Every structure is written in structure tokens, then in C-alpha cells.
Amino acid sequence: MQPSSAPAVAAGSPLAQSDLIACEQFLRDVFSRFLTFKTHSLYFPRAGDDPAAEGFGPDFSLAAHLSAERKVLIPLCADGRLLGVFIARGASLGAPRTLLPLLPRIAAMALREASLAKALATDALTGLATGETLLANMAGEIERVQERILPGSGGLADPGLSGPRGGFGLVALDLDFFSRVAAQHGFLAAEATLAAVGRLFARLCPQQGLAARLHDDLFGFFLPGASAARCRETAETFVRELSRLTFPVPATGESFSLTASAGAAAYPQDMRGGQFAAPPAEQARVLWRKAKKALAVAKDLGRDQAMAWSRILAEGGVVLETLPLSRLAVSLGRFAEAEAGQRFLVWSPKNERPRDIRKSDGERVSGRSPTTIKGEVALLEVGEDMAFAEVLQLADPDMPLEPGDRLLLAPEAGDATASVPACDASPRRDKVTGLYDRRDFLRLAAQDREKRQTFSMVLALMPDASRERRPERPAEADLAETVAVCRAHFGQDALGGRFSSAKIVFYLPGREPESLREAAEACLAALTERLGKAAVGIAGYPCLDYSRADVADNCRKALDHALLLPEGPRLAVFDSLSLTVSGDRLFAMGDVYAAMEEFKQALLADEGNILARNSLGICLARLGRLEAARAEFTRVIGRDAKNTMALYNLGCVCRRLSEAKAARTAFQKCLRADPQHVFSLLRLGRMAEEDRRFETARKYYRRAMETQNGPALTLRHLARLAFAQGRLEEAREHLHQALLHDPKDAFSLHLMARLYLEEGQDPAIAEAMARQAAALRPDRPEFWRELSRALAAQGKDDAAREALARAEGV
């Protein structure tokens, strides 16, 4: 057996019964080399069972052969403990006398290999997972989230079939001034402290989550299903609970406490544009970097706090240095999505402090000084991690801006030029490129566009943002060459500006967007050949009911559309599909109402945009407007009678309207258009199962199993069907397989907990699985009821009543 073949089971030591579920597929592969069998499952004996009664012998040295039932039972032991039994069904045993004593030894070797794999996935000091395990879990979850990240990709969210994959949270946490612990109390005390911190985090981490130690005093927490707000709340909980912990130093009798800083990021909310096109493993690393950036900001702002990635730009900036000519160096860069031209209010935390005043009559009154705005600045040049800004105004010349002052993003009005203050000075051009800065470009374009009936804007993402720049070549040289190539194709007299540190923009009066497509394609080809892969978005006026001021924002949407194109030149002219992409992103972030507006605009631009109409129907269904949703899906089918997405979604809506016949008809039409449409097969199977037409349901489920990715989606439905028919061993086998495909399948965990309780097995394992199911889907009252049953079976009556109350409150 090769060590690499063993799975990385959940962090923790030593092996536990729950680890056997993760190892089941591995064990099956091992035993199949020595034993022929048809099916298999795991069994966990109850406490107090006599292993000799099963034929294992007092030291578990024998496998049991039940020849009449064609079963072989193999004891799975670790450290002298019987963890479980591997049951091989339909087994053929050629040489029982030789194999029966050999199989337990093979099992011991397999479990030893699994234990080693577990050790590799576990930090030895804290017992938490390793950084590699954390990133692997993130990458796997990203793959599952991407199946539903756009409404058009997965159709109407159907939690009864495959469960929602709305996203996840990530927290990076670092102990403040931890190096002082080793310096003051010694390295052994530092290691004991990390071990205690690891135990605290293991207890605080949600059951469905994963806590990891990456290195030294840096920790990471993977939180499946957590919203951005929930992710930040969890980070704040970690910080708060750690500050309450006291660490003794036995050698001196002293004790000390610690604080921590944390950063939180959420998927997919904190990802942007082309980042979604990267492989899942790369996206996982990008998100980890964002969480670490938020952590660094939390430290910069004073430590002992948590910062969310989404709040860095708005409130996380700090003045690093004051420079001559009313310039500043600030801590915001393009990685934090800062852009040239953005305005910030500057305030000092020194002045915002509690005030305690004694009145003349001796009474004491207290309050807090209001935030004092010292001035306003605008970003000029933006680098990767820092930027340079100029001072626009000071509130009081006697209160100069200084290092440590904080930045607050100034709100912008609806018009893009509202953020650009009036300026009497002559427009300034960049000496390297001849481009105007963002403020002057917007001001000049705004002055001219009011006189034009037609104009276009071209927004280009520079090649340097799409590839690793050659270190021996200055960035200014790449920028100058990019501008020269763009001007050669869009015209030397085009008004050009620095839209941000990575984007350049051109204003072209009198030009329609489509007339620029050929020039843009040639420009991209030239840039790709000379510098690297770039991207271009084009938008213009007039367009639908958009105002002249909306063109810049439409350019951004077109560029986002271009970055998602799988092949060919990354070019998009703002159109109905650009609006659909924008709506899809808003939908993925949970802003259903804003997404609907984008889809409606997309349909105004192109009434035949089937994807936008289908997505609009999905939004309406999400909001409970089922009749309106049905009307949209029906319109799609009127244009394309074989549109499987609309047919399936129509069936789901009819089902929610309790129109079973219409739903069944829609699902069957979907199957005629695509016989491999797994969700329609599952839906028809589920409807047959609810009507107690079990054999019909089984036929649909078996067909679903034969489709691509069918087993991962179908196994728990087969398990539920077997459970309903009293075939408990078959149900167990299907559930084990389902959890191998997706260890965080809440419905499979729930059904497995029911199975353990029905068979009278260890209720503690049932409790663990029921807790995971309820944590993953707290909106399901039946999950809380099953948890209540598992708790009651262990005599935990108070906890059982609490769980039952949660079920009634859902």
C-alpha cells in the first residue's frame, strides 16, 4: 500500500470512529485486493458488546465469515480498541483458514497508514489542521460553490435535491506580540501557550468548520456556509474569548494574558472579475491573501480587533508618511481595490476619546469626543500595497495631517463627476504617458460629453495586471508602451486618463461602441504579442435609458464581462450579456433586488436574452413571486421549447404551487430534451417517492446514478428510499458513499443520525452527526428534532429541550 493513497481524515488524534467514515473508500480499495465482494458498509458496535460473540476472538485477531449470508466481518482496531467493523457483502472467500486471521492484520496496516495520513494533516503541537488541509478544504468548497454561483448555471436553487452552496467564510488570526512570550517565559511556555490556544480555537470553531495552524502563531478558520457578517462575528468571538484566557507559568507562579488580531474574508462576495476564472486552488490562495491583508490592517489599527476585507477600503486606510508639496503616503493599494482619484476624509483617533468632566455642583458627567475630520485627500498614484495622495483641503491649518491618522472613504454622488471637486488649475498630464489623472480626465470628459449626442468610452486593463511583470523592466515603460498601442488603434487625439493604477480609459466623442470593436481586437492582439494578455470593455451613449454619467460604470461592467470570457480576445462591448453577467454577480452576493434590475435592463436591450429572462424568473421565485416566475419561464419556453433550464425551473415553480401534474409534465419534457438531466430525474423520483410509488422512484434514481456526477447527487436519495422501505443496511451503505462524495452534506448527516438512533447504536455519534446537519442547515426544523432525540438518548434532557425549542422556532 502506498502512503499517498490514504485519505487525509479530519484533524485530531488518535483515530476515532468518525475517521472511519472518511477512510471507508480507502478501506474498501485495500480489502478488495484480497477479497471479492459486491457491496460493503461500516458498522459501529455498541458499548459493552462482546467481540468474541462476533467471532473476532478476545484480541480481535480473526475476521468472521457468515457463509450462509455471504458476509465477511473485519474488525477495525486501533490502539487495542475496536473502532468499528467493515462488512463485506456478497463475499467469496477462497481460503477461509488463511484469510480470516490475515484480514485483521491487513486492516491494522490500513488503519496505521490512515493514522499517518491523519498525522500529516494535523499540527502536532495544537491538534488543529495544517495549512495545506485548510487550503484543500477551501478549494473543494469553491468547486461546489461554483456549481451554483450564477443563477443560470444551476437553475432554481433546489435545497431538497443537492443542498445550497451559498459560499463560505475565512478568518486569519494572529496572536499580538507573541514573540514576547518566548522572550520573557521561555520557549516551553510559548509552546504550552500555543497548545492551550489551539484547544480554545478547536472548541470555539463551529462544528462544520475547520480550525488550522499555519505556522508559529498564525491560525486560519474555514467556515462553510458563513455569510460575510457571520464570518466577521466569528472572528470577533475568537478575539474576545482569547482575551479572557489566562496562561499560567508554573516555573515562576506568574500568569499572563494575550490578545489577537483577525481578518475575515468571504467567498464569493470578496472576489472580483477575473479572479473567478482562476482554478479553485488559486482562488483559495487569493482569498487567504485577502484574509491576511485584513489581519494586517487590524494590526495597523491598534490590534486586539477584527477587520473584514470588505471594510478595508472604506475605513482601514492609515497615513504612513507626510511628504513635501502637500503629499501623503497611505496604506491603501490596488490589492485593496484602491483607485486613483478616490477621495478620503482624514481623521485622528487621538482626538476621539472619552471625556469625564466634574460640574460645579460636584456631579460628574461623561461623554465621548466626536470624530474630528482634519481634511480631505485624493489618491494620485496607486501601487500594490500603498498609494500616494494629495491634500485637497485642511479643516484647520493648525491641525496638520500626520502619520497614524485614519482614512474614511468619502461618499460619491450618483454622477461620476460629483466626486471630482471643481478645480481652476490647468489639467495635468502624466509625464510618462501623456494621460490625465482620474480627476482631470473625468472633469474634461464631463465638460465635453454634455455637448455630444454620441460618444464612447474604452476601459482597458493593462497587461501588467494580467501577468508577472519582468523585474528588469520598469512599470512606467510597460505603461507607456500600452498607451502608445492603444492610441495607435483608437486615435492619437483621443482623451485618455488613468482610471486606476491598473486601468486606462479613453473618451471618444462621436464614436459608437460597435464601430470600435475591430480596433479593440487589433489593440488586444498587439498588446498580447508585445506585453501580455490585456482586457477591454467598451460602452457608449446613448444606451437604453442610461444617462451620460452612467457610461463609465457601464464600461466597468463590460470589462468584468470581458474578464470572464473563456477564450478568444478578452473584449466586451456593453450589451445585454454584460448586464446579465453583472446581475449574476449581484445574485451570487445575495442582492436579489439589484440583480433583478440588471436582468430587466438586459431584457430591454435584448428581449430575446433567454439567460437573462430565466435568471429574472429565478429571482422572482426566490422572492416568492411564483406566478410571475412561471410567466417568465413560460416565455422562455415559448421561444425555445427545448430549453432545459426553463423547463426544469418551471417544474420547480409548479411543484411549489402544489400543481403536481404540471410539474411532472415540465420535468418529463426536460428529460425528452436532455435524457441526462439529473435534476429532473431526481425531482421525478422524489415526487414518486412522496406518492409511495417506491419502485418508480428507484428507477428514476438509478437513471440519475448513471449520469455525469450522478452518484454525488443521488446517493442520499437512494438512502432515504431504502430507509423508508426498512432496508437499513442498504441505506447505511448509500449514506457512507454520499458522505465520501460530500462530507458536509447536511441531509446525509441527518439521515445517518436517524439511522444510528433507529438501530440503537452509540447516540454520541448520532449527536455529532445531527449537530453538523443542524449547523449546516439551521433552517431545517427536522434536523433540530433529530438532535433533540440524540441528546435525550444520552440523558442530556436540558440540551434536548433547547434543541426542540430551536426546531419549533424555525
Image (spheres, rainbow, N blue to C red):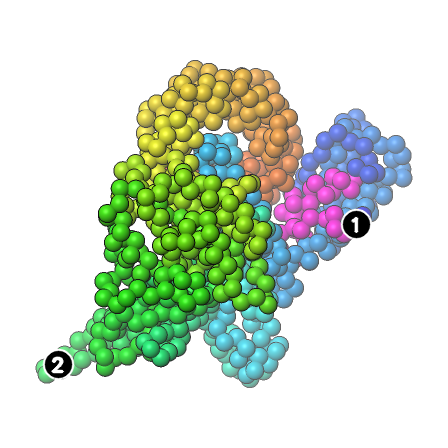
Q: Give the x, y percent position of residue 657.
A: 37, 23
Which residue is found at the position 60% from the left and 73% from the top? 191
Q: Give the x, y percent position of residue 101.
A: 85, 43
Secondary element at image label 2: loop
Q: Which residues are magenta?
A: 2-31
Q: Give the x, y percent position of residue 513.
A: 38, 41
Q: Is 104 displayed left or right of 305 in the figure?
A: right
Give the residue type that dot 2 points to: Lys
Near-viewer residue (55 or 526)? 526
Near-viewer residue (250 or 365)? 365
Q: Which residue is mark 2?
A: 359
Secondary element at image label 1: loop
Q: Is 185 displayed left or right of 89 in the figure?
A: left
Compare marks 2 and 1 and give the one earlier in the sequence: 1
Which residue is found at the position 37% from the left and 53% from the top? 493
Q: Which residue is mark 1?
A: 2
Q: Is 212 displayed left or right of 300 in the figure?
A: right
From where the camera sits, is residue 42 visible? yes
